[in-house]
Image (tube, rainbow, N blue to C red):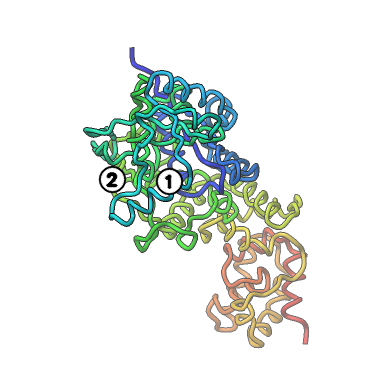
Amino acid sequence: MTQTPVLRFAPSPTGYLHIGGARTALFNWLYARHTGGIFRLRIEDTDRARSTPEAIDAILNGLTWLGLNWDGEPVYQFARAERHREVALALLAQGRAYRCFTTPEELDAMRAEQRAAGKPIRYDGRWRDRDPGPEQSGKPFVVRLKARSEGETLVHDVIQGDVRFANDQLDDMILLRSDGSPTYMLAVVVDDFDMGITHVIRGDDHLNNAARQLQIIEAMGWPIPIYGHLPLIHGHDGAKLSKRHGALAVEAWRDMGYLPEAMRNYLLRLGWSHGNDEIIPTEKAIAWFNLESIGRSPARFDAKKLDSINAQYMREMDNGQLAELTGELYQRLRGQRLDAKAMARLRALMEGLKERAKTLVELMEAANFLYQDGAPTLDPAAEKLLSPDARAELRALLPLLEACPWQADNLEQAVRQFAEHRTLKLGKIAQPLRAALTGRAASPPIFDVLLVLGRDESLRRLWAYAPDS
């Protein structure tokens, strides 16, 4: 009987959920959904000094925004400390771990000696086969794993291939600190076993950990999960991804106006491919996803590619839905709701607005002229279009518009006839019209704008920028 795949995303709440973590979560989620498996969330909050409730909230909110729904309740690692200690004591009882009474001063001296001799810095196993005497009674100790010192540890990795580690390069790692608290390395292995994790898909910065964790797994006689270590994401210049490249909190990308489905699509293509497909909706991603198609080389973050993908998803989105998302973003960023009139205008002009925007923020800002009545503030390009000559042409046009039936065809005919009569190219009058109505040099089609703003509001704005001299 085939075992149901169980995958997990296990972030440490010591900072925000960034692009690399989000991609790891996505790959685990996609494989679980592709195989009909289970996707679990574990918060690895054993670093009590650096773990914060705010970081936990950011992780939960970021995953929720991305649409990466986990199965069951999140597991909090720190709450399971007693279970972790139980396993360490079991290893101790089996002779697979030992008490180490080496003092901090002795460790410092040992490291200094190794450093001076040009040797690797690692614990030398001085308490590995030594029983404590009366002088150790009541003294602090740590519990260390009695790791294999000969041969090698082989990590079978579905992404990296077989990776071998010489056991004499892996020291006897600490399982329990001197205060009795379990270490991260122990907690991860115990939690994976207790949660029934079958696949451990994570960043390749954890590849060395796999060799160490395997020794705990083998010492306990537990099943070995399938490992897959993802290459890290680099910036466009090949350097390690940093804030200047876009290593921002997932929630920051939300507030920059990116759609979650576009982010999922973009993150999927950072290291995974399906032929030449670039736009891969989530339903297809679930159907197609496999571990074999994950590349071994680091992926490069490309903000322009993300913009392009996001723009395509916006263009294909229902106009009403896109207007709702824009309204939600407006409220989140500006602290106030758009009224019914503004939302109606936004929906009516969405087809023209979304063609010119790469993000919701760009769309929201391009629609500023719809949110309130009255003459819009001119941006520099619009100011340039409204030269004295252009304002004079608007003044001459206004009586024709006032007498015109307020339908798109009639308005366009009136403006075209005006331009022909004055031997002007249509743009010479349409551009100043656009500037006065929207405050910008680019907008949806100008006759649509006139129709959506309505007769009274349109004329009010035009008179404001073409006053009667």
Q: Is residue 415 above or below residue 172?
A: below
Q: Which residue is mark 1?
A: 107
In this picture, residue 194 sits left or right of residue 59: left
Secondary structure type for disc 1? helix
Q: Nearer the viewer, mark 2 or mark 1?
A: 1
* Residue 217, percent from left and from top: 37, 25
Q: Earlier in the sequence, mark 2 or mark 1?
A: 1
- Screen quadrant of the C terminus: bottom right
CA–CA distance between discs 2 and 1? 38 Å
The amino acid type of the residue labelled 1 equals Leu
At 71% from the left and 52% from the top, the residue drawn is 331
* Residue 223, percent from left and from top: 35, 21
> Can residue 361 be seen from the camera position used here?
yes
Q: Which residue is mark 2?
A: 296
At 71% from the left and 75% from the top, the residue drawn is 398
Q: Residue furthest left?
A: 151
* Pointer 1 local density, CA inside 10 Å: few below 14, some 14–19, many at least 20: some
Q: Nearer the viewer, residue 189 or 440?
A: 189
Q: Nearer the viewer, residue 168 or 413?
A: 168
Secondary structure type for disc 2? loop
* Pointer 2 local density, CA inside 10 Å: few below 14, some 14–19, many at least 20: some
At 55% from the left and 83% from the top, the residue drawn is 423
Q: Is residue 246 above or below residue 65?
A: below
The amino acid type of the residue labelled 2 equals Arg
The image quarter containing residue 47 is top right
* Residue 197, percent from left and from top: 42, 25
The image quarter containing residue 380 is bottom right
In this picture, residue 143 sits left or right of residue 221: right
- Screen quadrant of the N terminus: top left
* Residue 164, percent from left and from top: 24, 38
